[in-house]
Amino acid sequence: MKRKFLTNTYLRGVDKYILMQFEDDSLDCYTVIKKVNSIDKPYISTHTGKGVCLLKEGYYMVEYLPKNEKYGIRVFLDDKKNTISYYIDIIDDIGIDYEKGLYYDDLFLDITIDKVNDDIVKVWDEDELQKALDEKDITKEQYDVAYVTLKELLHQIADGTNKYINNNHKEYIEKNFK
């Protein structure tokens, strides 16, 4: 299992950025908003087979870490705050390190939703989850919870019922990112 800190995760090539983290009682989550100010070169994702720019100067990330769920959602937005992509980590636990900030323990299994290319939904790293179980890095219970969470999320995505995905991210940034 990998521990990931929201203050410095997913900033490939980013030299300068603004970060704001806070607790949002209305969404029952912790939130981190990042704005990229300087990057060595744009980060192009090929998750869908088609290149999609996820990080570039002026782009944003909104990361929702629900308090009572087994996932975290990262939203990539362009400089006009249009949603480009979602990256959902299936997780075991969340916490706060008072020196490093918010973190989650990643259970390897991921979902991506590509908003640029026809809302393509993909599941990633099932092999890594299986390997973690085989090597006893995670328990059978954690493995099972990861798949239950995956199934619930895929259902919510198909039905359009996930409140974090449905949130108006542009308005959310404009309201909360000062």
Image (cartoon, grey):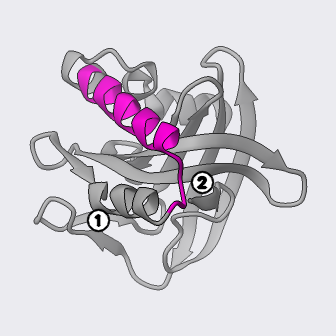
Question: Is the residue 51 above or below the residue 116 in the image?
Answer: below
Residue 141 in view here = yes
**Image quarter of the C terminus:** top right
Which residue occupies 64% across, 54% down? Answer: 6
Which quarter of the figure has residue 45?
Answer: bottom left
Q: Position of residue 27 (x, y in %)?
A: 60, 19
Give neighbour class at mark 2: few <14, some 14-19, many 20+ (Cα, 10 Å).
many
Judging depth in this view, the residue of 2 and 19 nearest the camera is: 2
Which quarter of the figure has residue 175?
Answer: top right
Residue 74 in view here = no
The answer to whether residue 107 is left or right of residue 43 is right
Judging depth in this view, the residue of 58 and 68 nearest the camera is: 68
**Image quarter of the N terminus:** bottom right
Residue labelled with disc 1: 53
Start and end of the magenta stretch?
136-155
Q: Say which label, 2 or 1, has the lower sequence index.
A: 2
Q: Which mark is residue 62?
A: none
